[in-house]
Image (cartoon, rainbow, N blue to C red):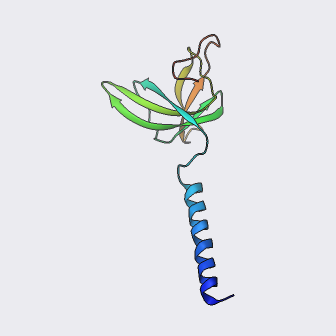
Amino acid sequence: MSTESKVGLFVLVGLVLLGWTIFLLGDVSLQRHYSMFVYFDDVSGLPNKAVVKLNGVEVGKVKEITLEGTKAKVELSIQQGVKIYKHAKFRIASTSIIGSKYLAIEQGDSDELLNGSP
């Protein structure tokens, strides 16, 4: 194998590894998601990209938090296929006393789906 071929192979492997690292560390997901909006009086330090859990199971992430009038508007990115019912309760929770914050959803009535759920 010539020197040029070895250098070319080395560069190719390096580019593949760089792409794989960006994929793993970046905010890239192959799953389909849908958006949902929730309004709070106080988001209590909830960060962007915080985890969203439904009955303790991770089902999405916080996409963006903005101020709309006097309310905090939280945009959620929920995994396709996860159904959230009409009277679901949304609250900000913590993993421990000094742990990170996440958005917890407790399911409501199974009779009616919330608008935006598939």
Residue found at x 55% / y 49%:
28
| Image position of 75 with respect to 20: above or below | above
Q: Is residue 23 visible?
A: yes
Q: Nearer the viewer, residue 100 or 37?
A: 37
| Image position of 108 with respect to 81: above or below | above
> Percent x, y for residue 89?
55, 20
Q: Residue extending furthest right?
A: 1
> Percent x, y for residue 117?
56, 23
| Image position of 22 with respect to 49: above or below | below
**Quadrant of the image containing the N terminus:** bottom right
Q: Nearer the viewer, residue 74 or 43?
A: 74
Q: Residue extending furthest top?
A: 111
**Quadrant of the image containing the C terminus:** top right
| Image position of 94 with respect to 28: above or below | above
Q: Nearer the viewer, residue 118 or 72?
A: 118
- Residue 9 appears in which quarter of the rendering? bottom right
> Percent x, y for residue 40?
42, 25
- Residue 83 appears in which quarter of the rendering? top right
Q: Residue extending furthest bottom?
A: 2
Residue found at x 60% / y 55%:
24
Q: Is residue 89 left or right of residue 45?
A: right
Q: How many marks?
A: 0
Q: Is residue 40 left or right of residue 60?
A: left
Residue found at x 46% / y 25%:
38
> Percent x, y for residue 18?
56, 66
Q: Is residue 46 left or right of residue 55?
A: left
Q: Is residue 94 visible?
A: no
